Image: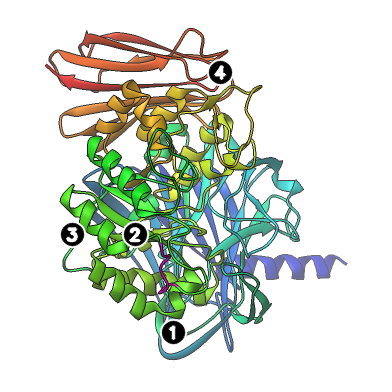
Amino acid sequence: MKKYAILLLSILFMNQLNAKEYLVKSPSERLTIKVIVDDGIHYSVLLKGKEIITSSPISLTLENQVLGKDAKVRKDKIVSVNEEIIPVVARKNARIPDVYNQLTLSFKDYNLHFRAYDEGVAYRWEVTTNGPLKVMGELATFTFPADHKVWFPEEESMFSHQERSYLDVKLSEITPERFASTGLLVDAGNNVKVYISESDLVTDYAGMFLKGSAENPFRLEGKFAGVVLEEEQRTDRDVAPVKYADYIAELEGPKSFPWRAMIISDDDRQLVESELIYKLAPENVLDDTNWIKPGKVAWDWWNALNIYGVDFKSGVNNATYKYYIDFAEKYGLDYIILDEGWYHLEDIMKVQDEIDVQELVNYGKDKGIGVILWVVWKALDDKLAEALDQFEAWGVKGIKIDFMQRDDQWMVNFYEKIARECAKRKLLVDYHGAYKPAGLERKYPNVITFEGVKGMENCKWSDQPDPEHNVTLPFIRMVAGPMDYTPGAMLNANKGNFRDIFEAPMAPGTRCHQLAMYVVFESPLQMLSDNPSNYYREPEAMEFLKEVPTVWDEIRVLEAKVGDYILMARRKGETWYVGAMTDWSPRALELDLSFLPDGNYTMQVWKDGVNAERHAADFKQEKQTVTRSSDIKIDMASGGGWAAIIKKN
């Protein structure tokens, strides 16, 4: 037995000698990635010297090879990058510092890249050989040292709109049978949060879900849809996979695979400010982007075209949409949407008798208002070139494409095909029924926004999303990229008196909770979802909605706690916009104006009224002179909010 023990220790010692350790630190050395290469490849991540992600195995299985197995490093190289990205469509900032250190490990026929930013880390596989590849599976793991809490957007199927609530679960409760869409947030203790998602999911691969691990109860593992072999068209919009292959993708090498990204914060504000997913995305491929115009949109579907006080029958007809165009002109909006109903659902080329798209486009053009058309993806794909050519000929400004509900390889490629074909015709794209942003909006900046969020449309049939969900979104879903939540409800309800009424919807939370969304929630194509007839009755609210922009030069998150509250300021030009939101708990916050340059400013405020706890639409306007040293107290009612515009005198 003694000889056996000595032999075993010798083998372990020799294995340790054979194992190679590689380190790459972020520019400030805040984060460190440690990579161990022995029989396999494991990585871990340290925050200020403390292990946050523990040893996590990774590999990529091809048909005839497992990348990462019996790995022998031929070359290792670290490069430092300090650049600046100027996005075509600004989201958080008009200029984005892109500063990182990258470790590249080169093996026979493939590379493995690790990037360390101060805000987070990422890794990706790269196959360097030419020829066909079949990816049988990918082992992407994220192992934690303890049984942490997770904000878990659980899915029942990979055929999903990815519009989820965030369940409060422990890592150990996530069995291999349970899985969630990404991004996903882990509370690692001591204020540390780890956000997990992906970037550069644009061509020839499937999106990543996360499931529990059979090997380690504190580990999350990637889950990927196989190539779809058979599908079933159940309705005009639901085309569901019914048979998957036992492999993820078929493609041609060489190939760089999506980044597996982790944003690591020790202050919740850092999550909201991060642009890591965008920085990891592929660069813009469009030569001409001058035509891409963000803006605000009058949307018809949420309010069920339920206008009133007019002398014509409201509905899907030109008279109603001209009313929307007139409203958009009055309040400085840029677009209207024709949502479901403008065409016969079985054939996208058959327009309803009551609709003349060309007449509406011409009417809008005279008033400076563009028209965007909603389409079901399958109906569009059936006649793609014919339909897009017609939209271009009409002078339509974009499409809102809906009900994809998948992120398998074919559908990921379809997203890029739509972006590419629409760009050729100078059409914006808004993806609904969609997975989260994962880099396509940088490569094709005409991709202006995404849904993939449990947004306000759900209030038509449920009591969600509520204020607690709303103050969770900036820290999880919005970290991935723009989200078409569709705010703007003028019928506001307290927790006890909310009712879901499909034809006349309301939203939980106060009026100022809704106004603040236009500062807090990012979408370069931002909806005004309520009825123009209701907006006409709310001129004070429209003072704010008329002026608030949809793209920004600078962001400052001032106070924030996941699921509880958020207070942020955004700058456009020399004007600052401030938005605060709380959950169902009344809350007082202090607004520190030290971000302002020296000088005197006029601050116009929209705040919850004294009776907002009883009547959620109650709000009050105020105007005062402030400086960067002024102390401002913000009081928010249950489900409340606060908004302000600050201009230099």
Q: Residue furthest front?
A: 311
The stretch drawn in magenta includes residue 387? no
State whether residue 85 appears in this view: no
Q: Residue furthest right?
A: 1
The residue that mark 1 highlights is 109
The residue that mark 3 highlights is 291
Name the front one of labels 1 and 3: 3
Q: Specify the principal SS of the magenta part.
A: loop
Disc 4/disc 1 C-alpha distance (Å) = 58 Å
Q: Callout 3, which amino acid?
A: Trp
Disc ID at residue 441: 2
The location of residue 169, given as percent across then percent down, is 70, 41
SS class, disc 2: helix
Identify the mark nearer the N-term, 4 or 1: 1
Name the front one of labels 2 and 4: 4
Task: Tell me the magenta residue range.
Answer: 348-353
Identify the mark nearer the N-term, 2 or 4: 2
Name the front one of labels 3 and 2: 3
Say left or right for 197 vs 628: right
The residue that mark 4 highlights is 638
Q: Callout 1, which amino acid?
A: Asp
Disc 3/disc 2 C-alpha distance (Å) = 15 Å
Front in this rendered view, residue 193 or 169: 169
Identify the mark nearer the N-term, 3 or 2: 3
